[in-house]
Amino acid sequence: MRGKHILLIEPDAYLAGIYAAKFASEHLQTQVAETLSSARKSIKKSVPKAVVVDVAVDQESGFDFIHELRSDPKTFAVPIFVLTALAAREHIARAFAAGATDYLIKGHFVPIEAVRKVKKAVLQ
């Protein structure tokens, strides 16, 4: 996918579909990746305007992925939103320490609220 888009890293196809539809309703193109490996491939092809990642996406640490994006000159300024069910304070602190822009807990935000936070960051 070329141009301005959001990269959504979500292993649950059902949730990914809901969020992709909500991003589309806000006029934001969405590339969906189910794994961090496929997310990396997508980023190599085209750097997204924002990344939305569930840090519990697979066996590899999503927190390390955030740090990896912050360490890369191509992606260091891309807003990174964590959207996950992990709600422990240590998870939140670890995400921000790795470089997350915001931390959204699934179940505390309805999808459109999360999408609007991302859209606001993309348009700034």
Image (tube, rainbow, N blue to C red):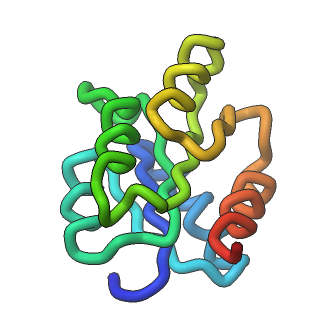
Up the image or down, 11 lies above or below 8; here it is above
Q: Out of 60 and 44, give the one closest to the viewer.
A: 44
Which quarter of the rendering shows the N terminus? bottom left
Up the image or down, 27 lies above or below 19; here it is below
Residue occupying the point 68% across, 32% down: 105
Query: Where residue 115 sits: x, y (%)?
Result: 70, 61
Left or right of 121 in this view: 57: left
Query: Where residue 94 sits: x, y (%)?
Result: 50, 21
Residue 3 in which image quadrant? bottom left
Query: Where residue 45 sits: x, y (%)?
Result: 22, 75
Q: Out of 119 and 8, give the one closest to the viewer.
A: 119
Left or right of 95 in this view: 106: right
Residue occupying the point 37% across, 36% down: 57
Query: Where residue 106 sits: x, y (%)?
Result: 67, 35
Residue 112 in which image quadrant? bottom right
Q: Residue furthest bottom?
A: 3
Residue occupying the point 49% across, 39% down: 99
Which quarter of the rendering shows the C terminus? bottom right
Residue occupying the point 31% across, 27% down: 61
Left or right of 16 in this view: 56: left
Up the image or down, 45 lies above or below 42; here it is below
Q: Out of 70 and 105, give the one closest to the viewer.
A: 70
How many discs appear? 0
